[in-house]
Amino acid sequence: MKPIHVGLCGVGTVGGGTATVLKRNCEEIARRAGRPIVIRAAANRDLERARALVGADVELYDDALQIARHPQIDIVVELIGGTTIAKEVVLTAIEQGKHVVTANKKLIAEYGNEIFARAQEKGVMVAFEAAVAGGVPIIKALREGLTANKIEWVAGIINGTSNFILTEMRDKGAAFADVLAEAQRLGYAEADPTFDIEGHDAAHKLTIMSAIAFGIPVQFDKAYLEGISTLQAADIKYAQELGYRIKLLGVTRRRAEGIELRVAPTLIPAKRLIANVDGVMNAVLVKGDAVGATLYYGPGAGAEPTASSVIADLVDITRLATADPEHRVPHLAFQPSALADLPILPISEVETCYYLRLNVLDQTGVLADVTRILADQDISVDAMLQRPSDGSGDDGRDDVVIITHLAVEKRVDAALARIEALPAINGKVVKLRLEHLNG
Amino acid sequence: MKPIHVGLCGVGTVGGGTATVLKRNCEEIARRAGRPIVIRAAANRDLERARALVGADVELYDDALQIARHPQIDIVVELIGGTTIAKEVVLTAIEQGKHVVTANKKLIAEYGNEIFARAQEKGVMVAFEAAVAGGVPIIKALREGLTANKIEWVAGIINGTSNFILTEMRDKGAAFADVLAEAQRLGYAEADPTFDIEGHDAAHKLTIMSAIAFGIPVQFDKAYLEGISTLQAADIKYAQELGYRIKLLGVTRRRAEGIELRVAPTLIPAKRLIANVDGVMNAVLVKGDAVGATLYYGPGAGAEPTASSVIADLVDITRLATADPEHRVPHLAFQPSALADLPILPISEVETCYYLRLNVLDQTGVLADVTRILADQDISVDAMLQRPSDGSGDDGRDDVVIITHLAVEKRVDAALARIEALPAINGKVVKLRLEHLNG
């Protein structure tokens, strides 16, 4: 049968992986897709490098737009990254009536609405399984596997770098800075790790999952994000004593008033399966009203895991390429005309449980003051832990850790302002969110 | 838009759940599917019960074949169970040009080849996501999410009853019979639990996953199965001491010579995520050559979890119902003309690691004899544990537990025959398989 011709824009790690896997498993893939899927052309700034990765029989260009306009290309794979050239390439390919596969989470989270609208007009597909959780087919699960459900929430460990750092901090009791340096040495963290450790990368992925889960447009600019760089070893230790682990967790939850969309270091019960997802691995837990909780776990990055998702999209598109657009799965799971306009809630309106660590002068009455202030704001206490803050207690200061029941963030912040003003309270209160993730 | 009309054959637990969820989430589901999905007719022997579950506006029949032949029904949902009436209903619906959704693992594992061939001829779809792992969209993951990969193996905890029993045996150190009685009291085990605890149910599910993973016909009759009813508390305890847990594991693996297809109580490293899947939950771990290991976890049974998968299939079919058959995902993931003829290997040819427990008279030289016999069969020892078999050692007998490296089953059996003939060996050797499940 006539092969599907793919144009590869960007031949780096993932592009190289895609070329390798498409070649190695060409027979297996054709047996599934019904026809061969072949890279016909590729674009890369470094042509020599590209040649080494894609082989001798592929046309090479140094300008990705030539791929987007190439008359013999059926599907354009965008692996350039960023949102300037990548966006131009994707929109050009769509204009030319070509289907697009991209691994670019930033592009989809920030410009997805525009891109999908153009694709809809032109009757082409834009697929992005590789944009979230690497090789884990979580977009497919959310968009097609769980279509019976009203999704209640999605919670994910979706940044491998941060999860590696948190795992090491917990296992070795080490400080953030030391573990970051180790992660950089191992190649798990970039020289400038900001994008990963401050939650941007996770928030891009979460934004995409949120849109698909709830049938809303992508709205990255409304996501709340908090990273792990200020997380202290003491909190990881106390969390563990209380039966929790701290993960950089993306949480998006549907409430009557709107959608919560937030990435932050979060306590989760140690007994949950997802709490045991360690190192660079990713996992996404989805709560649907019919199915309950299902979990999807696997490698969140890497050349071949990401290529696995890119190629799954190529096979999907190959199967549907000549079908009428009505037969396709909508980009954001819901029909474009049926998206909801539920607002994204500001972080102050988020409702969750909280971990609070107070450094207190060991004097009578202070805990009574603290609990009274919490009660004034309708915040009830689930668990409490008191420990000498320097390990000996000689300085007369204690760490008091409080786990709250469900509370609204702005009420917690109001209580903390009053608590921090108490004379017996030393410095700022550490506030972390806590999710029980009940199935 | 014109609704899709569904005919429900069998209104029991899952049928009732399907009706409930379709009604509760009708708006959400229509927003995804592009048109409403409505139960128009249902069949059940007990009409009164059916009426209570499906509501007043559904046509009721006491004969499922009337649904299969109903001119206004687009998709027939078969939830009758068994392989007599169910098979007739499915084949009749196909003959009538209707699509079929079924949760019937036995029907697909035993008669899938025939059913898919007829569906292919008639250009209709037969979907069966609910047949494996309840609400977990594992068929979709294997068939569509991992299409880039040469699948190397699939390992699953896919029988909730057995997993509940094994979890309780481990947690409470209880005997099989006591825990089974408790499971029956809680409704997790049937009055006649054979089908679950002897591995039949898991083998049906594994057979289906094996076919989709490797592109081979379903061949349930060649599956090897071993249940948990003879499993002893001592082995669960020793496994734990050595860092393993025992699960009723379905394993299907591609080897050069053929496919392994087996369900048996199996040791897996306690540190693996899948080893921590407890109670009635299901999980499937899939190893692909590109993606590595990915895991899919969730409820393996129950009214609404199973309904979740039934309805996901209904949405998939609704999206594709009027498309040409060429655009559909093949029933067994691979194009029907591209199935492989790799044989299913007999259990004697299986290659894995083994857990062996010998009851030995505590006398000099016996371990030397045992290890020599193992070495004669090319079986090398990975770990060994020796414990007084009655806890005190007063009877002069020890339990010796041996973990082997990779070995071929027939060689292990040959070695065990010789070991059991040694005068110092008391009774039969306990042999369990062990899988490292390396990602």
Image (cartoon, coloured by chain):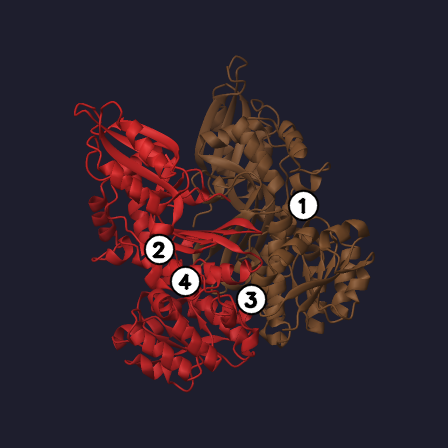
Chain colours: A brown, B red
Q: Chain of mark 3?
A: A
Measured along the vertical axis of the image, is residue A175 above or below residue A274?
A: above
Front residue (pair A390, B267): B267
Front residue (pair B220, B163): B220
CA gap, disc 4 and disc 2? 18 Å
Q: Secondary structure at mark 1?
A: helix
Q: Quadrant of residue A185?
A: top right
> Where's residue A325, x and y in %?
63, 74
Which residue is under mark 3? A31
CA gap, disc 3 and disc 1? 39 Å
Which residue is under mark 4? B208
Residue B388 visible somewhere in the drawing: yes
Residue in the picture at 33% in, 32% down: B372
Which residue is under mark 2? B346
Could you tell me how many numbered marks the image carries?
Answer: 4
Q: Chain of mark 4?
A: B
Toward the bottom, the furthest residue is B71
CA gap, disc 2 and disc 3? 26 Å
Residue A46 visible somewhere in the drawing: no
Residue in the picture at 34% in, 52% down: B347
* Amino acid carrying mark 2 in the image: Pro
